Image (spheres, rainbow, N blue to C red):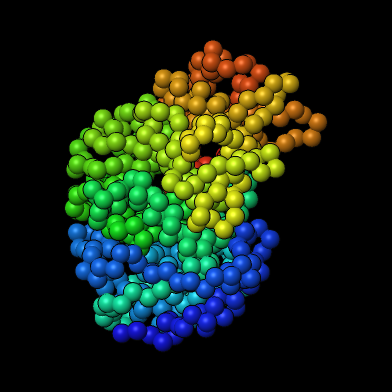
């Protein structure tokens, strides 16, 4: 059954889009309403149109496309009038349902980099009138909420007809992780999300793995997780697993519950935890890693332990995923089809038909032509000490090459007036002292870049996707200095 409040005629839909695409805070890169109204084409919410296809796995139980659409329409009926909604659902299926329902109501999903109360409060203050969709009873002071997955909600009859979404609708505002400073919001239109997912499916899945089961260790609020789980299910023909998969035992159980071909979406930090896992995993078709550089040694260990090729995604919140490589074979990246690199104001940029404008990249690249490039590191990673230059990424990789070092990061502390900036390091190495690590590092880098201080920890303050927010690093450093 179709709900009139959701399905609108194209002209009316354009009018609604103009109303919700109001100016956003300065940190957002959302396109203006005039740009959104330039084309009123619509794209299906789900592709391909196969009502009985399994779209998601809830444990070992498959949810069909028709069942999912019934859940989406039922939730959309309960959503309040607003322009923005914080999608805070932890369960992936609930997140998918809320994501689709919010879009069908002509609203924008706000996807925070964490669910810390301070972060939620800051975003809510920036988007007055927003509400939250949650799948638990967590309360955020002063923020209206809708509970998805509530046992008291109306029944969800299956829906056969696929609704459509304005291709220029701002489906989501995705916030950066804060690894290089204050999180920034970036607007993602429905067209961009759909086509990026289809490019990724074409690159990684292909016709030989149609209907692949996607199991992820990353949350859907993160750009990488959104593209490779939610959008790969909605636009790429895959089925996403909705259960918890944080620990190796949980991941092993999740993979065993879904049919082949199985695709694991993960991060280097999770791969490192899975490699020594005592029990074998079921056969995998493919492993995809992102969010942090993957060392070729770890990639080789993962391929041997898990029995599947490991491919790495290169992307950023600003542009989404755009390139890949098989890490054990090459250091060279290959852009997705139809994308190309360019130079803008002295910086590298990427272009594609699914991107509204060329996107300036936060990294320094060596363009090799034919869509191939080498990654040199983040522009913000370059530091100068004693008249010499180096990269924080290169210094971190040097630490990780030391036998016994399990995890590490080199970063620049908060500046102190009158002092030259010097890098600091946090290291996880249970059987090494700071002096032993520093001694090994002296043989690998220019001594002027030796981190001071170099502090050994039991764990680094990584977030849910394995990134290291700068604020967490600075806080950890202050605690150790106190």
Residue 436: give x, y in percent of width and height.
50, 16
Relative height, residue 212 to residue 344 (above, below) = below
Lateral position of residue 327 relative to residue 279, left or right: right
Relative height, residue 233 to residue 21 (above, below) = above
Foreground of the two, 126 or 13: 13
Image quadrant occupied by the C terminus: top right
Q: Residue at x 45, y 83 (%)?
A: 8
Residue 380: give x, y in percent of width and height.
64, 37
Q: Residue at x 40, y 55 (%)?
A: 197
The answer to whether residue 112 is visible is no
Lateral position of residue 19 relative to residue 155, left or right: right
Residue 375: give x, y in percent of width and height.
52, 33
Number of numbered callouts drawn: 0
Q: Quadrant of residue 281?
A: top left
Residue 437: give x, y in percent of width and height.
50, 19
Q: Residue at x 39, y 32 (%)?
A: 327
Foreground of the two, 448 or 283: 283
């Amino acid at each position: 059954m179709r709900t009139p409040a959701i399905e609108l005629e194209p002209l009316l839909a354009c009018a609604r889009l103009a109303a919700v695409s109001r100016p956003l805070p300065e940190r957002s890169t959302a396109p203006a309403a005039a740009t959104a109204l330039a084309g009123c084409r619509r794209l299906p919410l789900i592709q391909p149109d196969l009502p009985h296809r399994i779209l998601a796995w809830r444990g070992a139980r498959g949810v069909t496309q028709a069942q999912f659409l019934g859940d989406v329409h039922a939730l959309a009926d309960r959503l309040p009038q607003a322009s923005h909604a914080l999608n805070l659902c932890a369960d992936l299926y609930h997140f998918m349902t809320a994501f689709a329902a919010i879009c069908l109501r002509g609203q924008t999903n706000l996807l925070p980099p964490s669910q810390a109360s301070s972060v939620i409060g800051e975003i809510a203050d920036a988007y007055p009138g927003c509400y939250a969709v949650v799948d638990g009873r967590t309360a955020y002071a002063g923020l209206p909420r809708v509970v998805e997955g509530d046992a008291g909600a109306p029944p969800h009859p299956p829906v056969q007809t696929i609704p459509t979404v304005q291709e220029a609708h701002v489906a989501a505002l995705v916030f950066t992780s804060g690894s290089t400073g204050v999180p920034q919001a970036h607007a993602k239109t429905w067209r961009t999300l759909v086509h990026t997912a289809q490019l990724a499916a074409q690159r990684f899945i292909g016709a030989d793995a149609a209907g692949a089961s996607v199991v992820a260790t990353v949350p859907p609020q993160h750009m990488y997780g959104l593209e490779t789980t939610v959008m790969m299910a909605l636009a790429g023909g895959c089925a996403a697993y909705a259960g918890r998969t944080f620990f190796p035992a949980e991941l092993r159980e999740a993979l065993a519950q879904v049919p082949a071909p199985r695709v694991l979406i993960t991060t280097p930090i999770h791969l490192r935890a899975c490699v020594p896992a005592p029990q074998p995993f079921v056969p995998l078709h493919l492993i995809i890693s992102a969010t942090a550089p993957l060392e070729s040694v770890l990639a080789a260990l993962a391929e041997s332990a898990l029995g599947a090729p490991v491919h790495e995604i290169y992307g950023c919140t600003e542009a989404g995923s755009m390139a890949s490589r098989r890490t054990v074979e090459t250091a060279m990246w290959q852009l997705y089809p139809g994308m190309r690199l360019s130079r803008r104001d002295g910086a590298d940029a990427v272009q594609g038909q699914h991107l509204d404008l060329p996107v300036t990249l936060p990294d320094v690249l060596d363009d090799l032509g034919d869509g191939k490039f080498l990654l040199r590191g983040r522009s913000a990673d370059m530091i100068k000490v004693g008249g010499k230059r180096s990269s924080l990424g290169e210094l971190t990789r040097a630490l990780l090459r030391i036998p016994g070092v399990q995890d590490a990061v080199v970063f620049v502390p908060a500046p102190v007036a009158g002092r030259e900036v010097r890098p600091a390091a946090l290291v996880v190495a249970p059987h090494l002292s700071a002096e032993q690590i520093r001694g090994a590092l002296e043989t690998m880098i220019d001594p002027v870049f030796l981190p001071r201080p170099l502090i050994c920890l039991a764990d680094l303050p990584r977030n849910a996707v394995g990134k290291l927010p700068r604020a967490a690093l600075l806080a950890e450093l202050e605690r150790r200095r106190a």
